[in-house]
Image (cartoon, rainbow, N blue to C red):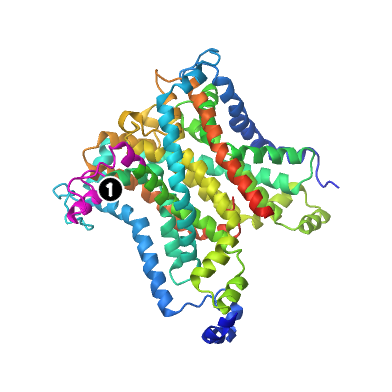
Amino acid sequence: MTTVTERPAQVQDGTTPARRKGSFGFNSVSPREKVVRYLLLVFVLLITIGPFLWQLSTSLKGSGEDIYTRIPQLLPSQPTFHHYKEVTDTIPVWDYARNSLLVAVLVVGGNVIGASLAGFAISRLQFRGRRIVLGLFLATLVLPGEVTIISQYVTVRELGLANTLFGVALPGMIGALNVLLMYNAFRALPLEVDQAAIVDGANAWQRFVYIGLPSVRGTVSVIAIFAFIGAWDDFLWPLIVLTDPNKYTLTVGLQYLSGTFSNNPRLIAAGTMIAFIPIVIVFATLQRFFFKGVEEGAVKG
Amino acid sequence: MRYNRWFTPWVLVIPALTWLLVFNLWPSINTVILSFTNARPIGGGHFVGLKNFETLLHDEQLRWALLNSVIYMVVCLPFLTVLPLLLAVLVEKKLPGITFFRTAFYTPVVASAVVVALIWQWILDDRGLVNGLAEKLGVISGPLPFLSDQWLLLLSAISLTIWKGLGYYMIIYLAALGNVGRELHEAAAVDGAGPFRRFVHITIPGVRGTMILISILISVSALRVFSELFILSGGKGGPGGRDSSVVMLIQQYSQGFEGNLGYASALSIVLFFVTVVPMLVLARLNRRGAEA
């Protein structure tokens, strides 16, 4: 406590009105700290983004270019899109992309609709067995998906959906976790709002559409983003369900491609970029909603 | 008091409930049933008693897989509980351009495990970036067999998992940091505590609950690892299949004429018990810590 005297500068800083602004007063950064922070940020950036750039660069390097050189060159000296063309000519990559997109759209739609309906009912409507239903959803969280993947396959096979894209999408179309996230989001609404709406004669459906949904848009977007990414990136499940190479999703197709072209890293690189770039664009466009949703507390468990 | 007809909530809940029953609860029960059969991927199969479980006991590949899982978990835990927290502290301050950095750090999470594993496969190739640079710098004389040596392959997959997980846990920590009182930091700063002491005495206790949650998530996902090992090993599980994970074995038995869904189900039950252990241990730690 005796050290207080050592910090007059800090205290003076603090007395400026800026302090009241909360996030900037105390957080104001000294120039030296700023430099250190940016250096660290750039360092981490190299680690996280570097490998992607390296792959992008490999995919653009000309066939005559030595990609194995000891002194790595990030910029291709004979840049070309040739490998992208070659990959798409040899392997139906666009079909794979379309398959992935179809699965992802089904999964996003199913989760947004199914999870918000159920989440709304469990958190805002009174009914017998409500607690049991909630408990059931909670209980399944302990179970890693891989544990039931074999019997899930048996179920899908019995529904006649083995080796179909619908079979790939179906089990993930309403995730228990998403139901719980929606339940949490709806619960944050004050009960009085519902009561006022009831006095005004709004039925459950109207309360869902006009009061519930507009106030949980953050969580809905987080669920949609995660569902899309999850479906687009999933590998194990489509690998088990799909046997026909024409029906492959991008991830399974990529693995197939890497086996076929194992002697030409440029082609594999082009293939990975075709799978990677769309998802990055989707995420970069929607990251605003994602980080907002995170701040609202949608991703706490 | 009720403001809706009795069936309205059920109409809304039934889709989700159907999915839960058909794709979660029933498969859980069916996994146990299947594990006593010799069901084939094409269909059919009959009751074989405890045969699958007897086979488990003598399955050398499973022993390797379990060992790999434990190593995976033990190495991932310290790195993925600490590094993402440091990252979260780094991106917490709203400096100009911070959204760009946050998004960029999250990119490996967004990319498919297959994509990043293929990228790393190229980087760790005998003639890839890492070996090239290391040879150039004279650290090594010949290429290190990152992808063909049993232990190096496991280590490569672990590093890949850590690298891919950084952004994910960073975001969870970031949400938790928002709840750590700014007043505490201010007060400590006034009392002369430097950034390091504030981190140890304020930030860490403040995110303790999140830390335990994250430890559970890391342990469970380390035990469930599949894509990284599968792709890096070219689907073969390394030399002699010794770099398999339990999930890789499950996948292996799920396919083709050699497939055995009964045995794969028995392996799934092993996986279940393996993943429940860290959850129970850490949940218990959490409770004890909360009482103290």
Which residue is at a point 46% across and 39% down the rendered structure image? Answer: B70
Which residue is at a point 61% across and 63% down the rendered structure image? Answer: B179
Residue A196 is covered by the magenta coloring: no
Q: Quadrant of residue A272?
A: top left
Disc 1: host chain? B
Dot 1: within a 10 Å radius of its alpha carbon, few (fewer than 14), some, or many (20 or more) residues?
some
Give the residue number, with chain letter if any, for mark 1. Answer: B123
* Residue A217 appears in the rendering: yes
Q: Secondary structure at mark 1?
A: helix
Quick one: A215 or A76, which is closer to the camera?
A76
Residue A290 x %, y %? 52, 56
Q: From what the image shows, is residue A72 above or below residue A92?
A: below
Which region shows up in magenta?
Answer: B125-154
Kindly give the residue lying farthest to the left in the view shown: A64
Three-letter amino acid code of the residue under disc 1: Ile
Residue B32 x %, y %? 58, 23
Residue A141 x %, y %? 60, 40
